[in-house]
Image: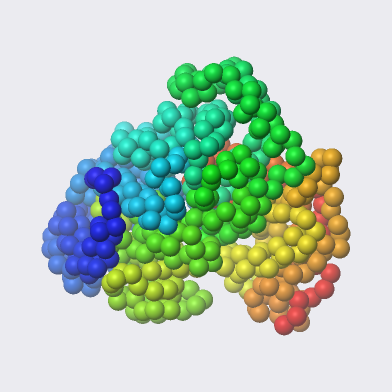
Amino acid sequence: MSLGCDFSVLEELTSNAKKIQDNVLDKILKTNANTEYLHRFLEGSSDKELFKKNVPVVSYEDVKPYIDRVANGEPSDIISGEPITTFNRSSGTSSGNQKIYPTNNIYFENLLFGYALSSVVMSKHVDGYKQGKMMIFRFTHQISPTPCGLPIAPALTSFTKSKYYSRMAKNSTSPYVVALCPDPKQSMYCQLLCGLVQRDEVVSVGTTFPSVLVQIVHFLENYWKELSSNIRSGHVSDWITDLSCRDSVSIILGEPNAELADLIEKECRQESWQGIITRLWPKTKCIETIVTGTMSQHIPALDYYSNKLPLVSKVYASSEAFYGLNLNPLSKPQHVSYTFLPNMSYFEFIHVDADGEATSEIVDLVDVKLGDYYEPLVTNYSGSLHRCKVGDILQVTGFYNNTPQFRFVRRKNTVLCVDVEPTTEEDISKALARATVVLESSDLILTGFTCYGDISTVPGHYVFYVELKAKVNNGTTVLQLDNKVLVEYCCVMEESLSGIYRRLRGDEGSIGALEIRVVQKGTFDSLMEFFVSRGSSISQYKTPICIKSAEALQVLEDKVLARFFSDRSPTL
């Protein structure tokens, strides 16, 4: 697939969405109709109407036994008419469980095409985007074999290590080999060093998910003196032992540069790190990272570190498929909508109400209605997923030509419940956004957040772990915590939750007072390291909005500094 995309390609796709979707399904069915899975329902037919009538709507758990059989060595034609080339592994931080998806080169071609088209969109909206360099941090995870001998890795690792990604990496501040470094600490250090040396060329800074970018700023806080020393001496630190990293970064580092080293030290020594991104990379036009859904919890920290540069959520994609693009990339996070690309997979939509409960209606991509809510179904080219629920709730916000645009609302499943209240990701995100105002009035910013439902107490109650940072360094590493402020933070959180929660918390007393546990600086870095050590990819890591692992909870508990509770029942 060519990287030579232009806006005419987008116009053609979105103007002919129905025809393209029909062609996509026809191709998928002709390729996969005789697989063991589909043959039960279609008996070799590639008829679209028979597909819709006979093939059931499923979840991942329904198709997992077939995927496992292929991973364990049975023929791939159980599920796919095309050879399977690799298995993508999801991060597991959204659902609590890692999933594997058989895939082939079409998936990677789609990613390449989607990212190339997103760059066309960015060039239209961001002056100098094509001419500048991107400091987009990429990390790869170890690839391991399945019993059948095919590789398994996080989707972004497989893509980054493929021939497709190397064609995208030409305008990056870091050499391609640095992203391939198996040691994330060495890779992060080298990517920062390359970015600092080329600071005047950087127009965009980013990571796939914002929790990683916040961790990179924390890393910079700990290593800026050493990075500056490397630039001053023209010599890469001895602990960078990966030879590919060392050799390629040494070329970029070049001769000693005392002037740049002085500038970095001057900026990083300041009491406040507000705007540190724009101070170190002054031509940066935007931050590229996904801040829709629960990722919005990181907006205050990113605004602080970037002096409120535009936060760009470019694409909507997952391990299952690439879905669409944000055609208005400079829009505020709460206004982001994604235009689906009809050539990526075959998409259907289950109509749901605002609470995510399904109605009986399933419609095609071009038949969704403005303002309504849907859960997408994916039928992809690899043959592993047919009418499979993705688990996201989307709302139709408009159309671009004949193609709908969707706002990501939330993941479908309830996140917290200690009684009978269904608290969703969206509920928590809204409460968090409202309570953040309390922190800002006290010159605190939230840099990490997660929660769990504690039912060891009677009644059960919500526990929120928060990592806080003072906007101005007071000359001490001890965070000053104001009891009144944090109790009010608890109360505002409760006031912002659903009516059902407030009733059970107040009148019925079946939910206990909401609790905030403030954790030490770096705790959420440790949480990420915990998940990465258990197979998650740094590039795909999203801080779980709710913790389900007892071991992960212990990582947090070991670093709790103080506890605060709401001191009044929320109003109904």
Look at 81% across and 40% down and name the residue there. Answer: 477
Relative image position of residue 445 (x, y in whole percent): 72, 54
- Residue 464 visible somewhere in the drawing: yes
Answer above or below: position of 131 versus 512.
above
Q: Quadrant of residue 338?
A: bottom left
**Tally of numbered tags:** 0
Look at 17% across and 62% down and name the residue there. Answer: 23
In the foreground, 487 or 72: 487
Instruction: Name the colour scheme.
Output: rainbow
Left or right of 230? Residue 515 is right
Relative image position of residue 163 (x, y in whole percent): 30, 35
Left or right of 185? Residue 120 is left
Look at 18% across and 72% down and name the residue there. Answer: 49
Relative image position of residue 426 (x, y in whole percent): 57, 68
Look at 22% across and 67% down and name the residue there. Answer: 16
In the foreground, 563 or 255: 255
Relative image position of residue 459 (x, y in whole percent): 75, 68
Q: Quadrant of residue 217?
A: top right
User: Looking at the figure, which quarter contains the C terminus?
Assistant: bottom right
- Residue 230 visible somewhere in the drawing: no
Answer above or below: position of 478 versus 463.
above
User: Looking at the figure, which quarter contains the N terminus?
Assistant: top left
In the foreground, 106 or 397: 397
